[in-house]
Image (cartoon, rainbow, N blue to C red):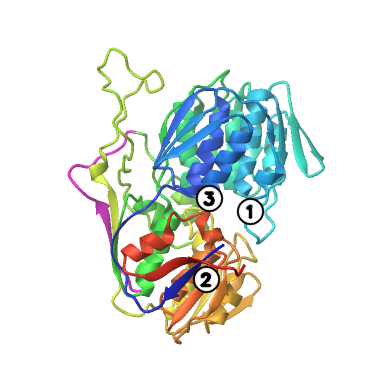
């Protein structure tokens, strides 16, 4: 087992390319079960969660090979419709295979999921949505059994906006007979990206980027290639890491508007931030208004929650190899429409500079486009450097504060009251041995260690390997004093 050893006090500076989104990849990969054939998923991050999903698909007869950042998937011969406990227990996103399996094969047996060790995150909405589409759902010995002759279109309202449930029911609805209407659907960028890929596969979906999705089921889909969107949570983590060290960094290969809420709060804390497009040229992908944009910003404004400010929609960086010339007499049959996106030289960039201690800035997490719950632990660490007290409220997962006792081992003063924590910052923290409890808590501990006096050891870093690609290498490239070493401790 590995651990990180971090010597605090280094200022982060330099340029860093952001990897593909973990949650984006984990949604695209199960979609390949919907149609037999070969897929190329570009900008795929080399993460333990991606490898777990690959092994799960492999247990069903799907071949997955990751070369660099290109993931090739062959779903021609699916031999099993079961997602066994040994794979699903490691990662909740494994549950994504339920919808595609029952939609294409009329049967699925999927273990109830595992994942990060915090908070009740039931799969009720997944099951209710797929059941509304006509599947018979039963629970047996820790497994969900779903069966149907063929799914049929239906109207379904998500009582809670759920990314996982929206993705699962959306994939299932693409092959259902008739029309489906999904309301209060999640509008997170990862869902938008999944819907765009499904469209490329032949699905008929309207309302992409909004909370109302209309799907006209088709008899069959076909393979398509896709590029994974940049990881907005990784980008936010590195921006906060630079800010807490009074650093100056540039992130490339990002979509700034996916980070609008985080950027606004960082600016409120005193950071100087610029975002835009590098290289020559600009323009629209031609995907339609709101597809890669803010989608339903009006919902945030109407509710009065999450005082975030929309920014202009930038073009998304194209990270794929060139597509065939559309004038060629033998174009790729899976890509009948020329790719309108600009070349990768037009990468979106975010520059951050911090010259002082941050101001104490309260945050309240919310569904996209609000402040992400996945950045809550990192913000907690950041506010340790602020001279004053900060209230951090998580409206998504009320008990996501397992990082607090570990930060206390560094000398942090944090109170937890219901679904909020009060961070009393401005005091020097000192290095100690701390233990990761989950993926984002790990990131918070690393950020705090960057300003701790002396040496900090972070144990159980397998958690962070689930969602950050070579995080220590990237931090080293920015000047952090961090190394990965083997340890007997657990």
Q: Earlier in the sequence, mark 2 or mark 1?
A: 1
Residue 208 visible, this angle? no
What's drawn in magenta, residue-wise?
Answer: 270-286
State the residue in front, 282 or 109.
Answer: 109
Determine the residue located farthest toward the top in the rendered image: 329
Looking at the rendered structure, the secondary structure element under dot 2 is: strand
Q: Which residue is mark 3?
A: 48
Asked whether, in this view, residue 478 is left or right of residue 181, the answer is left
Mark 2 vs mark 3: which is more N-terminal? 3
Viewer-nearest residue: 211 or 380? 380
- Quarter location, residue 134: top right
Q: CA distance from mark 2 to mark 3?
A: 18 Å
**Pointer 1: what residue?**
115
Spatial CA distance of label 3 from label 1 is 12 Å
Neighbor class of circle 1 (other Cα within 10 Å; few <14, some 14-19, many 20+) is some
SS for dot 1? loop
Q: Which numbered disc covers residue 458? A: 2
The earlier-in-sequence mark between 3 and 1 is 3
Horizontal side of 83 relative to 240 (left or right) equals right
Cβ atoms at labels 2 and 1 below 8 Å apart: no
Q: Is residue 293 visible?
A: yes
> Is label 3 in a helix, a strand or a loop?
helix
């Amino acid at each position: 087992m590995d651990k990180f050893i971090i010597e605090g006090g280094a200022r982060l500076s330099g340029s860093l390319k952001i990897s593909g989104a973990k949650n984006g990849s984990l949604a695209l990969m199960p979609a390949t079960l919907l149609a037999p054939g070969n897929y190329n998923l570009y900008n795929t991050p080399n993460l333990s969660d991606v490898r777990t999903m690959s092994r799960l698909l492999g247990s069903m007869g799907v071949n997955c090979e990751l070369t660099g950042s290109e993931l090739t998937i062959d779903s021609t011969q699916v031999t099993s419709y079961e997602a066994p406990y040994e794979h699903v227990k490691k990662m909740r996103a494994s549950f994504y295979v339920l919808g595609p399996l029952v939609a294409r094969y009329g049967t699925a047996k999927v273990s109830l999921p595992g994942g990060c060790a915090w908070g009740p995150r039931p799969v009720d909405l997944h099951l209710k949505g797929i059941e509304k589409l006509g599947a018979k759902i039963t629970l047996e010995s820790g497994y969900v059994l779903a069966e149907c002759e063929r799914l049929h279109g239906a109207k379904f309202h998500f009582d809670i906006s759920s990314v996982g449930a929206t993705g699962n029911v959306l994939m299932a609805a693409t092959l259902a007979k008739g029309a489906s209407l999904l309301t209060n659907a999640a509008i997170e960028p990862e869902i938008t990206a999944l819907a765009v890929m499904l469209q490329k596969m032949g699905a008929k979906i309207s309302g992409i980027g909004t909370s109302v999705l209309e799907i006209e089921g088709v008899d069959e889909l076909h393979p398509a290639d896709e590029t994974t969107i940049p990881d907005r949570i990784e980008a936010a983590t590195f921006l906060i890491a630079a800010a807490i060290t009074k650093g100056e960094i540039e992130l490339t290969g990002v979509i700034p508007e996916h980070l609008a809420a985080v950027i606004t709060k960082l600016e409120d804390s005193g950071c100087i931030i610029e975002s835009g497009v590098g290289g020559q040229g600009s323009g629209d992908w031609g995907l339609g208004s709101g597809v890669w944009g803010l989608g339903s910003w009006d919902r945030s404004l109407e509710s009065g929650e999450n005082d975030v400010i929309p920014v202009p929609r930038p073009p998304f960086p194209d990270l794929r190899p060139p597509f065939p010339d559309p004038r060629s007499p033998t174009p790729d049959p899976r890509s009948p429409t020329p790719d309108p996106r600009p070349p990768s030289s037009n990468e979106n960039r975010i520059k951050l500079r911090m010259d002082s201690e941050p101001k104490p800035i309260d945050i309240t997490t919310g569904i996209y486009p609000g402040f992400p719950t996945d950045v809550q632990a990192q913000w907690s660490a950041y506010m340790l450097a602020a001279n004053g007290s900060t209230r951090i409220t998580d409206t998504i997962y009320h008990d996501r504060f397992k990082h607090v006792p570990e930060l206390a081992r560094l000398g942090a003063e944090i109170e937890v009251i219901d679904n909020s924590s009060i961070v009393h910052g401005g005091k020097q923290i000192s290095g100690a041995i701390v233990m990761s409890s989950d993926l984002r808590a790990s990131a918070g501990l690393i950020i705090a260690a960057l300003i701790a006096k002396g040496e900090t050891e972070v144990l159980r870093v397998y958690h962070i390997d689930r969602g950050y690609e070579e995080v220590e290498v990237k931090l080293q490239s920015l000047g952090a004093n961090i190394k990965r070493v083997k340890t007997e401790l657990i």
